[in-house]
Amino acid sequence: MADAFSWIRNNPAGFLILTVKRIGYFWFPDVKERLTFAYDLLWTPVALAGLYVAARQNKYLSTGLVAMWIGYSCVYSFVQSSVRYSYPIQWSLDILVAILAAQIGRRIPLRFLDYVGGDTAHVAKYNL
């Protein structure tokens, strides 16, 4: 452990670069499968848009998620990275994408659903 602290003291720029790379690897792991890489590359920005929507609707939810992300990922900024480390928080990205999709769904005019053949009879029943 003393060797590690000595290296950090002697190489602060190298330590900073290594830490930033590990943060990047946590959120966008180096995976061999293109589908997984595409999922991470597309899903994360969409989830961030969902975080914006969630923050406007419920600041406690969004603050809690951001605190969880920072607290959980902070540990993995200083240890060797692995794809599996980000799995336990993937659910939070999925929820934010669902929040964004629900917000977009609310903005689709009901007459559009009639146009594409959707049944809007339930709308009057549930006051949607």
Image (cartoon, helix red, strand yellow):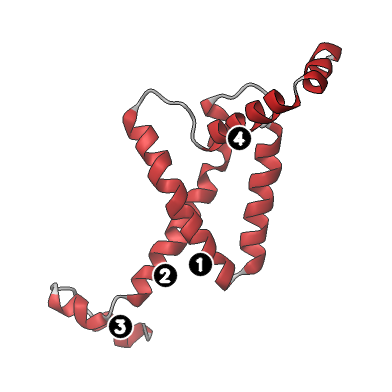
Identity, as a three-letter code, of the amino acid under mark 1: Val
Q: Which residue is mark 3?
A: 123
Q: What amino acid is found at the position of numbered circle 4 in the picture? A: Ile
Label 4, label 1: how many angstroms apart (C-alpha)? 24 Å
Disc 2 and disc 1 in contact, CB within 8 angstroms:
yes
Q: CA distance from mark 3 to mark 4?
A: 46 Å
> In screen coordinates, is 35 left or right of 70?
left
Eye-nearest disc, 2 or 3: 2
Q: Residue at x 54, y 65 (%)?
A: 54
**Cα distance between the residues tagged 3 and 1:** 24 Å
Q: Residue furthest right?
A: 2
Q: For mark 4, does the 10 Å Cα neighbourhood hold few (<14), some (14 to 19), or many (20 or more) residues?
A: some
Identify the residue shown where x is 13% and y is 73%: 117
Residue picked out by circle 2: 103
Residue occupied by mark 1? 53
- Of the 4 image quadrants, the one containing the C terminus is bottom left
Which label number is shown at residue 23?
Answer: 4
Amino acid type shown at disc 2: Gln
108 on left or right of 51: left
